[in-house]
Amino acid sequence: MDKKLIVNACKPEGELGSKLLEKMNKSHEDLALWGVSHLSINDNDIILDIGCGGGVNVKRFNEMTPNGKVYGLDYSEVSVKKSIHLNESAIKEGKVEIIQGSVSKLPFENNTFNIATCFETVYFWSDFVEDLKEVNRVLKPGGIIFICNEAVGEEYVLEKMKKYIEILDMNIYSEKELRFALFNAGFTDIETLRKENTDWVSVLACKKYMKNIRI
Ligand SMILES: C[S@@+](CC[C@H](N)C(=O)[O-])C[C@H]1O[C@@H](n2cnc3c(N)ncnc32)[C@H](O)[C@@H]1O
């Protein structure tokens, strides 16, 4: 892939960003389906998809939650536009909202979401543990964070991805680093999954359920 296009993966901009989002909506589909197969979603769940990109996962979650609501958040204006376009009718029905913002300062009240998902985005977060704490804040007690990455931080992957790491200044985390960051951000019941014969990794973790908390 050409450098001008690759550079858009961390924050899509302009026409090239728009083109890359269309590509990613298709090229990330198998990864997303594998990831979603590990999630138990109730029809009334309130879901936040962070780094929603072209909005394909927002659309999928909306179809899975007829009595719930799905929010997509992204700090790129182009990603927000694309996601709005793809989810236009659900937005009109009040079932979906797409918001421009950063994971570092989520524009939501504490204890709002049942599930927060992060597909192919944590590589670019500026302060991983602090950003995870922010996700933890907006999850309901017992709520789930789900991270799904097509690249795991193992020696051979880091070597293979060298060009991307340099261009994008991205962090490709190992299973151990993902677990450690989630633990440090206050999550419990952390479970990592690997898909055989791929570099894919996903993690599920839970916001601690506290007695006597009113939500
Ligand atoms: C590689 S794309 C993945 C898009 C989509 N989730 C997918 O799987 O196709 C990464 C997305 O995360 C967004 N992103 C990266 N860092 C972010 C941050 N700190 N806050 C909000 N969005 C972020 C980017 O703007 C981009 O749209």
Image: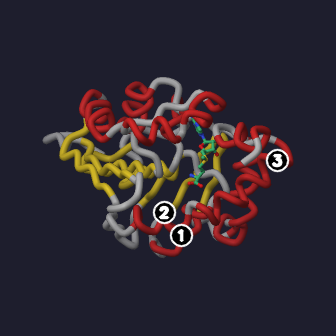
Name which residue lies at 84% across and 43% down. Answer: 14
Residue identifier under label 2: 32
Label 3: how many Cα within 10 Å (few below 14, some 14–19, many 20+): some
For the question of whether residue 27 can be seen, the reply is yes
* Depth order, front residue of 197/132: 197
Q: Are marks 2 and 1 in contact (CB under 8 Å)?
A: yes
Element type at mark 1: helix
Element type at mark 2: helix
Q: Tell me if residue 73 comes above or below residue 42 in the rendering.
A: above
Name which residue lies at 13% across and 41% down. Answer: 211
Label 2: how many Cα within 10 Å (few below 14, some 14–19, many 20+): many
Q: Quadrant of ligand 1?
A: top right
* Mark positioned earlier in the residue sequence (2 or 1): 2
* Mark positioned earlier in the residue sequence (3 or 2): 3
Look at the numbered disc 2 and say if its residue's Cβ is closer than 8 Å to ligand 1: yes
Identity of the residue furthest to the right in this view: 15
Q: Identify which amino acid the numbered label 3 is placed on.
A: Leu
